[in-house]
Amino acid sequence: MKFSTKLLIAGLSTGLGYEKAQALQEQRSLRSRLTEKTLPFIQVVPVIKNQADYQNALAKSAQHYRLPSIVEKLYDFHPTQNGSDVLELNPAIKKVSGEVIFYIHGGGYWGQPLIPHFNMLHQLANKLGSRIVLPIYPKAPAYKATDAYEMVLSAYQELLDDEHVDPQRITFMGDSAGGGLALALMQKLRDDHLSLPKRAVLLSPWLDVTNSNPKMSQIQPVDPMLDLKNLTRLGRGYIGDLDSHDPLASPIYGDSSELPSIYVFTGTHDILNADALKFQRLADQNDWNVTTFNYQKMNHVFSVFPIPEGTDSLNRIVHIIQSSDDQ
């Protein structure tokens, strides 16, 4: 072994030892700490810095979504019918439970679902024996909040029209922007006296597109994924003619009474954690049926990452859906 190679191995060992010690001190897994260091290099939402970025995003959002072939091959997702923007995954026949997860994906309302979304949903389908229904709603800036809402509502109504589906076996689930849209949809369903799902599970939900919570800027230095200014810019491009405080875009300003059980998963290294905790305080004050799982030092939508804390959150979700005590 060459001397330089020995030095490299020694250096790597020393570095890994340091990371292990830091993870232990922070009371988190080593894998989560190492993953966090890679996240600044991963673009989870479109970044709009100039007019060229905007025009590029505009052109992409105007195009019809095409399901990547690798997703079909690896995770068995497929359109519900030819040309449909609603995707589904059906578990193996022997594992079918009758549960349905109606999942609204995140991406700042501008981005399409990513491979980690499909991977996580594939895991849940296998663990629960559940059918997954994934509407690919139209994206900003070509489309706006009302367009996204109408498409998701139509997909949900189509699901309800299936005689084999029991609304009390449906779980709404969404991450980030999709979590906000899932809550907004439930508020509208209640107001319009339409069938509600059994429960909702919101992962790092974006509940207020104004991003006006002052605690967000305090969290920003430790958030490796989301930029407050960019996210606010995306929010403005999404709302269209709506007021930014309209519950359809910012459901934290809506009434969440008389809704099914809502479970929120959030991490303290996520700027959206500020509004997740605010939502829980509002729930406590108004007797809304909300339970929040606040994970220390976890990042935005940590549930989709292959880290112990993400696995723990998925196991909790499986337990929630399987539990006969959920009311």
Image: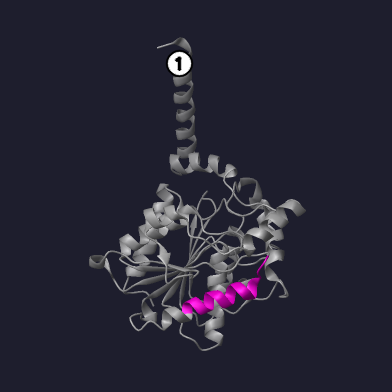
Q: Residue furthest front?
A: 82
Quarter of the figure with residue 229 = bottom right
Residue 47 horizontal/vertical position (percent): 67, 52
Magenta region, main secondary structure: helix
Quarter of the figure with residue 250 = bottom right
Residue 32 horizontal/vertical position (percent): 47, 44
Q: Is residue 11 shown left or right of residue 90?
A: right
The relative height of residue 278 versus residue 286 in the rendered view (above or below) is above
Which residues make up the magenta segment?
A: 142-156
Task: Please give the residue where the numbered disc 1 appears in the rendered image.
Answer: 5
Identify the image quadrant of the N terminus. top left
Quarter of the figure with residue 249 = bottom right
Residue 277 horizontal/vertical position (percent): 57, 63
Identify the image quadrant of the C terminus. bottom left
Q: Is residue 315 visible?
A: no
- Residue depicted at x 71% and y 52%: 53
Specify the amino acid type for callout 1.
Thr
| Relative depth, front residue between 5 and 276 | 5
Residue 309 horizontal/vertical position (percent): 43, 50
- Residue depicted at x 62% and y 52%: 226
Label 1 element class = helix
The relative height of residue 195 versus residue 22 in the rendered view (above or below) is below
| Relative depth, front residue between 150 and 257 | 150
Q: Is residue 155 shown left or right of residue 162?
A: right
The verdict on residue 148 being magenta is: yes
Q: Judge the density around disc 1: few (<14), some (14-19), many (≥20) Cα neighbours within 10 Å.
A: few
